Amino acid sequence: MIGADHQQERLKTIGWIVGFVDGEGCFSITLQKSSSLLTGWQVFPEFVVTQGAKSLQALSDLQKFFGCGKIFCNRRTDNHKEDLYRFCVRSVSDLQEKIIPFFQDNPLRTAKQQDLEKFVQVLRMMKDRKHLTFEGLKEIALIVQTMNRKKASRFLESSETIRQASFKR
Amino acid sequence: MIGADHQQERLKTIGWIVGFVDGEGCFSITLQKSSSLLTGWQVFPEFVVTQGAKSLQALSDLQKFFGCGKIFCNRRTDNHKEDLYRFCVRSVSDLQEKIIPFFQDNPLRTAKQQDLEKFVQVLRMMKDRKHLTFEGLKEIALIVQTMNRKKASRFLESSETIRQASFKR
């Protein structure tokens, strides 16, 4: 009987994580300048869930469930009542081996699912090391442009990109 | 086997609803002036979940699951990309008989649980018709002041309230 209860609780927890991430989660890809890479740009995928200090426990629950990620505090200096906390998974292997498989087994139920699919697509390209080539980077940037939290504009608009694109033709 | 799969899906859906409401839900109590009531004030409890047009389906899922509530569209005239939709349950009997029992069986896992408990407390006072007396209203207003979406300030600050409070002494 205890086993059955435990299994029920686990299924509810899986559902809770999907719902909470549908509400508060963010799958984002950032392209940042980097002088140490040949392309001049680095790709940063990140899975983030943000909560106020009063709900820090919910983030710890996520961290414990996934067995990865870190919790950071964004101290509030404005007139907001409480500090904000962010549960972040930035490790590409944790994203590939823990986060993505979970959401492939348990799909999101909002439009965030489309973001997740694009996120998965970029992670797959990274696995194939396409992000280390200029052509791959451009493809990634175009995908990021269609995501809710688009952060590719600096790459797509930079004069360096335009120069390199001209060079490639 | 189909039965077991169905049961698993149902448990995940229950978990999803709790998680989604932990993220996007709001239990609010509003005190509004009303000339038709002896106290001069009406109490409006409301359970709301908001989503962009792209995730309207998730709100329809909630409506279907709870078997109550309405979905309203807040048309966006600013530069936002999509209209906002609100799933709202305002009927006191639906709140008392459908929404609250669900969350009593399946507690929220964030600080929103504290708001829910205050919401339940106010609904219980309404069932006991305490919101129709000035003393009850004052008690409700003080509870609302401690909720995240406090909407009692007009009642607590109004000169009418102060006059009535003086009169009561």
Image: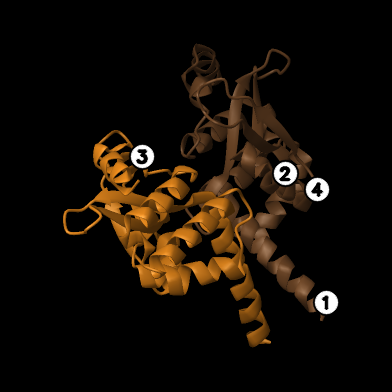
Chain colours: A orange, B brown
Q: Are marks 3 and 1 on the same chain?
A: no
**Where does label 4 land, which residue?**
B67
Secondary structure at badge 4 equals loop
Q: In the rendered image, is residue B169 in sight?
A: no
The three-letter code of the residue at mark 4 reads Gly
The three-letter code of the residue at mark 3 reads Ser
**Distance between the Cα atoms at labels 2 and 3?**
46 Å
**Camera-side mark, 1 or 2:** 1
B6 or B107: nearer the viewer:
B6
Quarter containing the N terminus of chain B: bottom right
**Where does label 1 land, which residue?**
B2
Q: Residue furthest front?
A: A169
Please give the name of the residue rendered at 61% of the width and 50% of the height, measured from the top-left corner. A110
Q: Are marks 4 and 3 on the same chain?
A: no
Residue A163 falls left or right of residue B40: left
Residue B125 % position (x, y): 66, 40
**Where does label 3 land, which residue?**
A153
Residue A60 figure quarter: bottom left
Please give the name of the residue rendered at 58% of the width and 57% of the height, measured from the top-left corner. A19
**Camera-side mark, 4 or 3:** 3
Using the image, tell me which numbered label, if any, was put on residue B42.
Answer: none
**Where does label 2 land, which residue?**
B95
The three-letter code of the residue at mark 1 reads Ile
**Camera-side mark, 4 or 1:** 1
